[in-house]
Amino acid sequence: KKYDYKYGDTKYLDLQSHLYIKKYTVDVYVQFYKGFFLDNPGQNLTYWPSSEIYPQRPDIRVINTGANIQYMFNYKKFNYRTTFTQDAWQKKSAGSWIVGGDLYYITSRGDSSLVPKNVSNPDFYMGYRFNKIHIFSIGPIGGYGHTFVVKKHWFFSISFLVGVAVGYSKLYGDVREEPNKTGITLNFTSNFRTGIGYNSRLYYIGLTYLNQSIFNQAPVNSAWISFDTGLFRLTLSRRFKLNKDYEIQDLIPGHRKKENQKEQ
């Protein structure tokens, strides 16, 4: 690959499912990554001689699994389907408060310490060296989403949810002399969605993005572990007529129509 010499080779399997139901949204993540590099080695390490090649760790593995569920109070006027699945059309600006919960489990390991020996900050993780991490967390989330509509067709949608969770974290010492560190931790999560585009009875054009961030307190004083995952998507679609009727939802108060249409 073109940049493997500079950044190393990353092997991954990234599975995401985002289920948009009338009142609820469900996100499920199952992600496997192997092979990492250290960004900004000139700032993070006491000495790194090359500006062409980054420090590489092909041995480091990360597994992230998690799920969340969200409920929209004002689902008759607003939900994510109009932006992310194209089987509904929101003609007027509207928003909704959203509540839910999430849980996740993250593990990472390497053949040696995940913290470089020549790290520039000697107090990083209080000087503790570890080669494996386990993190589990569960807690509530909540926030608000809104879709702005111009002339019934042009839309801009955005939502942001935050959560405070209780978790359990464990760090495994890199050598026998280093004891494992465990503890009940306070964690923070965020869920961000946005989309912009054009919607009508025949056409949908949209660019969407979603992001899930996890910020975990480590069982070491003044230390945190963070993880982010995101997804961009560009959708161009044309709806075609069918002989049989099926419902396409118009998100305006008390109004649903049957249309001889099918999205493709």
Image (tube, rainbow, N blue to C red):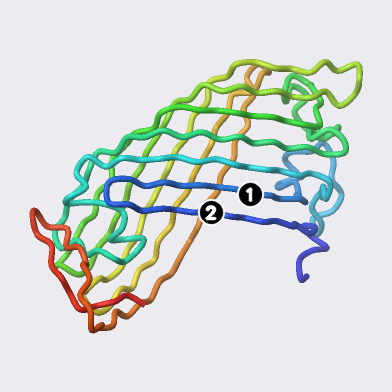
> In the depicted view, which residue is nearer to us: 75 or 40?
75
Q: Is residue 225 above or below residue 15?
A: above
Q: Quadrant of residue 71?
A: top left
Q: Amino acid at mark 2?
A: Gln
Seen in the image, is 104 located left or right of residue 86? right
- What amino acid does circle 1 point to? Gln
- Quadrant containing the C terminus is bottom left
Total marks in image? 2
Q: Which class describes the residues within 10 Å of circle 2: few (<14), some (14-19), or many (20+)? A: some
Q: Secondary structure at mark 1?
A: strand
Around disc 1, counting alpha carbons within 10 Å, would you say few (fewer than 14), some (14 to 19), or many (20 or more)?
A: some
Residue at the outermost front position? 244
Percent across and percent down for residue 208 are: 40, 61
User: Is 243 positioned to the left or the right of 133 in the image?
Assistant: left
Which residue appears at 62% of the width and 27% of the height?
A: 224
Task: Work out how far the residue at label 1 is from the one at label 2, CA to CA, in angstroms.
Answer: 8 Å
Is residue 71 found left or right of 259 in the rendered image?
A: right
Q: How far across and how far down the image is residue 191, in percent?
A: 43, 42
Q: Which residue is mark 1?
A: 31
Q: Determine the residue positioned at 86% across, 27% down.
A: 174
Furthest toward the left, the residue is 254
Q: Residue at x 52, y 26 (%)?
A: 187
**Where 45 falls versus 14 (above or below)?**
above
First in sequence, mark 1 or 2: give its number.
Answer: 2
Q: Name the quarter where the N terminus is drawn.
A: bottom right
Q: Quadrant of residue 41?
A: top right
Q: Position of residue 45 (x, y in %)?
A: 79, 38
As drawn, the label of residue 16 is 2
Which numbered disc covers residue 59? none
Where residue 121 sits: x, y (%)? 75, 28
